[in-house]
Amino acid sequence: MAKVAVVYWSGTGNTEKMAGAVAEGAKAAGAEVDLFEVDSFSVDQIDGFDALALGCPSMGAEELEEGSYEPFFAGAVDAGKLSGKPVVLFGSWGWGAGAWMETWSDRTKQAGAKLVDTFIVENEPDAEGLEGSKKLGAALVGAC
């Protein structure tokens, strides 16, 4: 049974809703899933999981949230913790065209992760957005 960590940051609750749906989809696909807000998860904990679902909304000029999420992600990259690990990325956005996800995807691949897929929604996830999030969680488990 795959062990999956869903690690997210959410300012308005939109990405948090997506994180819950990603976790639900991974559980339905047979994984053991732990859900973490990024401030309660350390880079060192990554080794205890087979796969990661990472969630962060677009912030500022289409960037990861700078106070908690960017330092966490950069630390994971610098420590080599993503190398060879199946990863999915998700988040919500309210402006721009999704460039933050393209940049984040590139960084994840350059870190050696097995990027399975990404999923973004505009603003609050509707039923379709939640279903897409569940499918993302299931796809992650399928890549383990």
Image (tube, grey):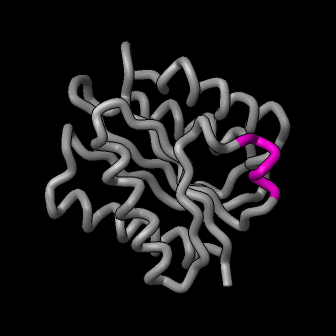
Q: Position of residue 5 (x, y in %)?
A: 61, 59
Report the quarter where the C terminus lies: bottom right
Q: Nearer the viewer, residue 104 or 42?
A: 42
Q: How many marks?
A: 0
Q: Position of residue 40 (x, y in %)?
A: 63, 42
Residue 67: in magenta span: no
Q: Nearer the viewer, residue 84 or 92?
A: 92
> Position of 105 compared to 71: left or right?
left
> Position of 42 compared to 23: left or right?
right
Q: Position of residue 81 (x, y in %)?
A: 79, 46
* Furthest residue toward front: 40
Up the image or down, 8 lies above or below 11; here it is below
Report the quarter where the N terminus lies: bottom right
Residue at x 49%, y 49% (from the top left corner): 89
Residue at x 82%, y 45% (from the top left corner): 44
Q: Position of residue 61 (x, y in %)?
A: 37, 14
Residue 44: in magenta span: yes
Q: Where on the picture, by quarter, is residue 71?
A: top right
- Which region of the structure is painted magenta? 42-47
> Position of 31 compared to 128: left or right?
right
Q: What secondary structure is the magenta-colored segment mainly?
A: helix
